[in-house]
Amino acid sequence: MTRIIAGVAGGRRLQTPTGDRTRPTSDRVREALFSAIEAWAGSLHDLRFLDLYAGSGAIGLEAWSRGAAGATLVEADRRTADLIRANARSIGCDAAEVVARAVASVLAEPARASYDVVFTDPPYPLTDEALAADLALLVANGWLADGALVVVERSRRGPEPTWPAGLEPLAGKRRQKKYGETTLWLAEAAVLSAADDH
């Protein structure tokens, strides 16, 4: 079991998948993640949130609880995706869209909407090359709003993600946060000027 930390559903319990199908983000790392997002955005109110490799859905549902206008959660394992739907119902979240497909196949399609914040927590065995391909598809297929924040959770022992053109790591100490065996890497999407748009 895990809990929503803050917001309208703060304290509510969420079910977590059994076995080794997922690697839940610890409460400490989740709190640090949302502190970093709120430091960047001011607040999550009215922002659209994309949670990739969503597991129990704790991150995307936490974003909704803290005011996100909507959350899309992508999880390839169908039983786990059903669990996310059950968790959303249990906390009264009707703004969550759960997509039960592989992340790479979802991102390979043109986005139906762009997102202000993207969190991706791929399995640690996912290769750096596959992660780089995911990030490139986020940029290429219109998943990112102008100036969107992208946060990647990886093993502390791994290298920094390969950021594609159109994603710039945040400056200085905001670029990465380390907690135990986990590192969060943060980057921002380019803002297109009116001239760039033509």
Image: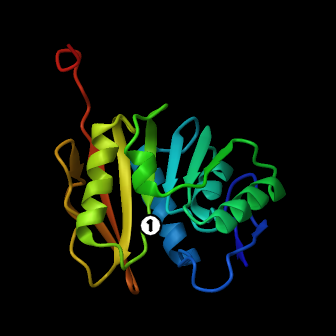
Q: Secondary structure at mark 1?
A: loop
> Residue 26: image x %, image y %?
55, 78
Category of crowding for the residue at label 1, using alpha-carbon neighbours closer than 10 angstroms: few (below 14), some (14–19), many (at least 20): many
Q: Quadrant of the C terminus?
A: top left
Tell me where residue 58 sits by quadrant: bottom right
Q: Which residue does the image show at 23% across and 47% down from the upper left?
A: 167
Q: Which residue does the image show at 38% across and 78% down from the upper left?
A: 124
Q: Nearer the viewer, residue 182 or 7?
A: 182
Side of 97 relative to 117 (left or right): right
Q: Which residue does the image show at 57% across and 53% down from the upper left?
A: 73
Q: Which residue, given by chain and number where applicable, does mark 1 sit on?
A: 121
Question: Please, what is the three-letter code of the amino acid marked with disc 1?
Answer: Asp
16 above or below 132? Answer: below
19 above or below 13? Answer: below
For the question of whether residue 175 can be seen, the reply is no
Side of 179 relative to 60 (left or right): left
> Residue 115: image x %, image y %?
45, 39
> Residue 63: image x %, image y %?
59, 52
Q: Quadrant of the N terminus?
A: bottom right
For the question of whether residue 192 can be seen, the reply is yes
> Residue 105: image x %, image y %?
43, 51
Q: Which residue does the image show at 42% across and 68% down from the upper left?
A: 122
